[in-house]
Amino acid sequence: MSKLRKLREWLTVDEAAKQLSISISEEVSEADILRLALDDHLTLSVYFVNHARGRPARIEPLADQPPILKEAEDFLAGHADTLSGSPEETINWLSDFVRNYRGDLLPNGREVLILEGDGQKPVRLEGVWDLLMLGAERLDIEHAYQNLTGGPAVELVCLGGPLVSSPDRRHIYQLLDSYKSSTRPPKPMPPLVKPQLSKGQREAIDLLSAICGPVTAPPPTIVSEENWDYETVYYPASGLPEDHALVVRTAALRELEKKLLSDEEEEPEKPLHPSERRSVAQIIAALAAMAGLDLSTPYAADETLRASAAVNGLEIPASPETVAKFLKDAAARGGKD
């Protein structure tokens, strides 16, 4: 890496590809960098040129979450005749509510994403943030990869928005888009106002509370930047902002380089050719003659070798049988051509 690049905190995808090509002595393209990120071998980041807006979130193990969805649905299905209104409609509403209560299950099936900051002003994000490759940002990278490789169009949609984090994953945000409305913003809904819920929904909440503890009503819409004649309403972005730049942190690139260079497989040793084995036996026989070792008594010679090795800080095979085998072979073949 050049002296100048050592001072940089991040490189563009093109620069990262060129640097990796030099490091591993193998041609690496921009598409390769994107594929490495999609396959979780490299952390890809985004640089917000004109800032972005985000909603705080956190990721928790699924095992730590109350397994209430299936239990709640089964419980309510068994008590459908006690609910007012349409039991099916109420149960469907509750299923959506419970998913929001528990959090969104991430693609790895082991963690859930829990959104925070209900009713609060979105956080302004600037600088470089890592892509978690769990939400809409993954589809953006897949789309870019397919474009570079002439692959098919990516038609999938992620409604959860792109997810970014700090390098230590202590700060996670869901990226937001916004629109302006010509009406004044509504007042935030209180944490739980039962009169605003239907009778069946209130009964469903009570039943759910009975099996998993107290719960609250669905959170209000995120609204901020109130003005006299308009409001700004935020919602999960469909993808990364148009004015973003994909980058690779130099620390992440060095980590990948280290891994690739350490994983280089050494060629396995070939078994000794008969002529090479004969040469080894001849060398052992010559060294034994110089040291005054009697190869006709291999086990006694082994004891002498061990004593000498201990004095000189050398190691020999732990098993006397192994040493005796080579000494016998040297005695039998050492003097032959």
Image (spheres, rainbow, N blue to C red):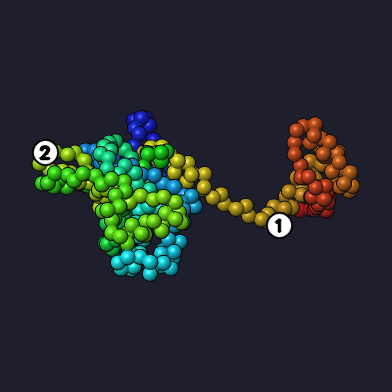
Image check: 209 left or right of 174?
right
* Mark 1 Cα shell of 10 Å, populated few (<14), some (14-19), many (≥20): few
Provide the secondary structure element on which disc 1 rests.
Answer: helix
Find residue 228 and name its label: 2
Q: What x and y, as percent, mark residue 166?
A: 37, 39
Quote the CA–CA distance across marks 1 and 2: 94 Å
Q: Residue at x 34, y 37 (%)?
A: 10
Image check: 302 left or right of 169?
right
* Mark 2 Cα shell of 10 Å, populated few (<14), some (14-19), many (≥20): few
Provide the secondary structure element on which disc 2 rests.
Answer: loop
Image check: 262 left or right of 92?
right
Q: Earlier in the sequence, mark 1 or mark 2?
A: 2
Q: Residue at x 69, y 52 (%)?
A: 276
Disc 2 residue type (three-letter): Trp
Q: State which quadrant residue 126 falls in.
A: top left
Q: Nearer the viewer, residue 196 or 31?
A: 196
Residue 97 visible here: yes
Q: State which quadrant residue 251 falls in.
A: top left
Q: What x and y, as percent, mark residue 250?
A: 38, 37
Disc 1 residue type (three-letter): Pro
Q: What x and y, as percent, mark residue 72?
A: 42, 61
Q: Against 78, is 292 above or below? A: above
Q: Quadrant of the N terminus?
A: top left
Q: Nearer the viewer, residue 328 or 38?
A: 38
Q: Of circles 1 and 2, which is in front?
A: 2
Question: What residue does disc 1 label?
Answer: 274
Q: Residue at x 81, y 52 (%)?
A: 325
